[in-house]
Amino acid sequence: MAIVHPDATLTPSKHELLSAWLPTTSWWPSTEPVPSFAANLRFDDPAGQVGMELQLLPLPVAGRFAVVTLTYRDAPLEGADLIGEMEHTVLGHRWVYDGSTDPVFLAEIAAVIAEGRGGSALQLRDGTPLDRPGMATGRGSGSGAGEPQIPRFVPADLPDSAIGTLEASWDAHPDPVVVAWLTA
C-alpha cells in the first residue's frame, strides 16, 4: 500500500520538476509543453524506503502518452538520473530520480510483471483506502525472470523477446496500454 499524505505540500511540485527536466532529455519532444499527468500508477518498495510511481502524460497525438517514471528518496542515489530535489512537508527533503535508472524501481517492475501483480493501492497513514482521480490500475502478466523495459511513449511496439507485460488503464482510458515488459 502506498501511503499518501493528502495535506502535504511539495516544493517544487512534481509538475514543476518535470517541466524543468523533461525538455533537457533527448527523448522529450522539446517543442511541447509538459502537460499534467493523465494517470499514474504507484508501486511499493518492499523495504518501505523508496516512493515509486509511473506517470502517463498525454501527448498532442490522440491516444499517445509519454511514460515518466519517478522515484522519491531521502538520500542521494549514486548513478541514477536526478530529476531534481523537493521539499515534502511531511517527509522532508527528497531526491527525485528517473525510475528507469533506479535499481529499486526496476526490481519492483520486474517483480510486478513476473508475479502477475498490479500497482499499489493508495491509503492514508491510518490505513483508510484512498481513491484519487487519475489513478491507473495495472496488471503484470509474465513468468520467469527478465530485464524490465520501460518505453518512453505508449502505445509502443512490443518486441518478440518480451516474456511478460505490465498494462495500465484508467477511467478516461479503459483500454489497457503496455507500459513495461520483461525481456529474456
Image (cartoon, rainbow, N blue to C red):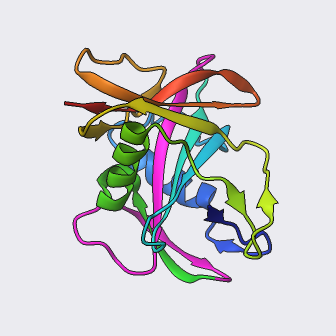
Quadrant where the C terminus sits is: top left
Vertical relation: 103 (above or below) 4? above
Residue at 70% over, 22% down: 174
Q: Position of residue 13 (x, y in %)?
A: 64, 64
In the image: residue 181, left or right of residue 64: left
In the image: residue 110, left or right of residue 174: left
Q: Position of residue 155 (x, y in %)?
A: 48, 20
Q: Position of residue 160 (x, y in %)?
A: 25, 14
In the image: residue 118, left or right of residue 73: right
Q: What span is colored magenta in the figure?
A: 61-90
Residue at 34% over, 77% down: 76
Q: Is residue 81 visible?
A: no
Quadrant where the N terminus sits is: bottom right
Q: Position of residue 8 (x, y in %)?
A: 73, 75
Residue at 64% over, 38% down: 137
Q: Is residue 180 magenta?
A: no
- Looking at the image, which residue sits at the far left? 184
